[in-house]
Image: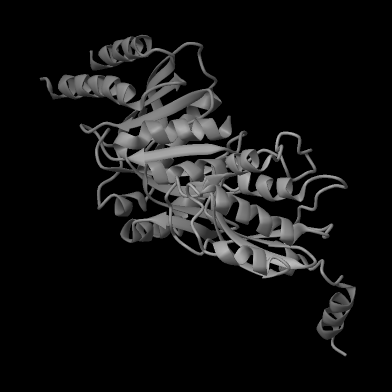
Amino acid sequence: MKDSQRLIEKITRLRVPGRDPDRAGRDISPAQGQDPLASFLTEIDETLLPRALTFRTDTSVLTVSAGNRRMISLDAAGGAASAAAEPILGKSMTRPDVADLGRLRDALVAAFAGSSAIFVKSDAPNSTETELAAGTTAVALASAWGVDLSAWPDSGWGGEDVAPIEDFLATVPRFSKAWLRIADGGVTEMGGDDGLLARLRDFADSADMAELDMEPNPEARRFISIGRAPSDGDCLLFVSDEMDAALVMVAAAELDEAKEAWRASIG
Amino acid sequence: MAEISLAEDLEELRKALLGCRLAAYADLSARMVLRISADPKPRQEEIDALCVLAAQCLDSPSLPAFFDGEAPYTAMVAGAIETQFFIRSINDPTDALILIVAEPVAQTSVWAAAQTVLDSQAEGQAAP
């Protein structure tokens, strides 16, 4: 038997059913006696960029659109949560009425009832909608449902610092014309004008990008803007933290706002 | 004469800009600072690193393609405590002003102040 085949069989045997990280995602299970709704809402609260979040339990699966620390919509539900979720599937959670808030809570309670384990997986958003005000904040949902998010303990995933790039990119739609995020040498997310995105992609592939990326910086957090004459035309922004980088195109007039957003992101 | 004027201009610029600790005039192609006004006096390694960074930001080969064929004239490297500004001389595109200013600082005020020095230099060099 070839080594590769033998290894595949060994890895397959070692898999634990229901704990496949590719299928299930990250473990956000609440500790004994803690409210699973707090797990759900904390995950929403820590989601800055638009994402499709899939929550799995032993009995249910829910997919929601989230971004800018808001829950935007409940997009899909399966298993024990199906019936409770059905009336609000695909419905916008922007300024929801009391009845829809109750229905959403009922669907979540049905999904999490009797299940000790919750896993979440984050994928690219189903929609390219970048409306920052869409949806309802996790804090507002917690308030409506009487869930105390501040009491949620730091279990290693909740309450940890948000990466500067993640935080910065959440503000970018406010002032940028186009942006793309780079991780592990490839573009992972983007937004804005298609023509400008093509120019950003060309620069991302150039040797200059590598040269700027390699510039020694003890903080490993950089904000570099390059432009034509002062206050004229567009500027190319290069930002990076310890993990990721991003290229952003902004009008020169918006540069101070972009810089302040970055400074806020790095604290 | 022009060199004395440049040293004075840099000194005035540094003192006029709130929080500015360094103002330098550099040759980008040689990656060398020609004149500097700074308080406190920086280590040579910091000056050398500034020249390299200025050249990377303003003279990288693929940047003109990004800016419709034009070389960039301004660059800014922002940090948590202070920000480095680079502005190319229109009169001599191989030269640039380098400024380090404490945050918070509005970039428009820095560019405007830097431009007066560059304009002064251009006039000085144009004079017989």
Residue that appears at 77% across and 63% down: A57
Residue closest to the eye, B115 or B52: B115
> Which quarter of the figure is the N terminus of chain B placed in?
top left
Given residues A163 and A171, the one toward you in this image is A171
Q: Is residue B121 visible?
A: yes
Q: Position of residue B30 (x, y in %)?
A: 39, 36
| Quadrant for the C terminus of chain B in the image | top left
Residue drawn where x is 43% and y is 52% of the image: A130
Placement of A241 over or under A105, stated as above or below: above
A132 or A78: nearer the viewer = A78
At 72% across and 43% down in the image, what residue appears?
Answer: A158
Residue at image position (70%, 58%) is A120
Q: Residue furthest bottom?
A: A1
Instruction: Give x and y (percent) for residue B82.
Output: 49, 23
Residue B127, image quadrant: top left
Q: Is residue B46 left or right of residue B117?
A: right
Residue A250, compared with residue B37, is above or below; it is below
Q: Is residue B74 visible?
A: no
Q: Position of residue A198 (x, y in %)?
A: 36, 61
Q: In this rendering, would B6 be left or right of A153?
A: left
- Quadrant in the picture for residue A75: bottom right
Residue B98 in picture, x, y percent from top left: 38, 26
